[in-house]
Amino acid sequence: MSVRRRLAASLVLTVAGVSILALPDSVEGPRLFEFGPGHGPSALDMIGIALLTPGASWLLVTLVGALPLLEYTPRVLLGLGGAGGLGLGLLLASVFAGFTGWWVIGALTLTAVELVLFARVWRGFSG
């Protein structure tokens, strides 16, 4: 499968999973269990997680695998890695430590890093 097809397929799975997870609580139903203050998946959330986990993992594996071909300088790679790590850290901290609202900054930071890499990889491979 070409790099572009892998990127497209992983993006579809990721967007579908995030879309399901973003549904309001009134649609989702009761939580199956809780793992943080106000956090826990419903049955519908589990479907979103089942789509998001392989999609996002596949996307990250594809992007990281293409890094050597992108010819970024070490400074750029350090900046992208630091920003991505900060974003992921804020996401996890907001869920497990109750940093309410910080998940938005973490999600936006991580998404920005992935979009930069996605656009560069997409342009670098014609098919």
Image (cartoon, rainbow, N blue to C red):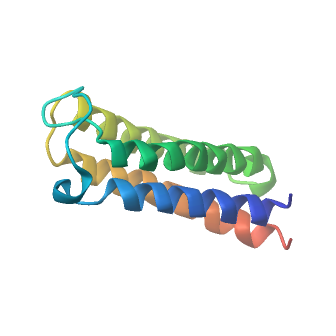
Res. 91 image quadrant: top left
Residue at 52% over, 56% down: 14
Viewed as shown, does residue 14 lie left or right of 98? Answer: right
Quadrant location of the N terminus?
A: bottom right
Q: Position of residue 8 (x, y in %)?
A: 67, 65
Q: Position of residue 66 (x, y in %)?
A: 76, 51
Q: Position of residue 55 (x, y in %)?
A: 59, 50
Q: Position of residue 59 (x, y in %)?
A: 63, 51
Residue at 38 percent of width and 58 percent of height: 20
Query: In the image shown, does 23 or 5 lie closer to the viewer?
Result: 23
In the rendered view, does 61 fall on the left or right side of 85? right
Q: Quadrant of residue 9?
A: bottom right
- x 81%, y 53%: residue: 69
Asked if residue 28 lies left or right of residue 53, the reply is left
For the C terminus, which image quadrant? Answer: bottom right
From this view, report whether residue 77 is shown above or below residue 24: above
User: Can you say whether 108 is above or below 103 in the image?
Assistant: below
Q: In the image, is 21 to the left or to the right of 11? A: left
Camera-side residue: 11 or 91? 11
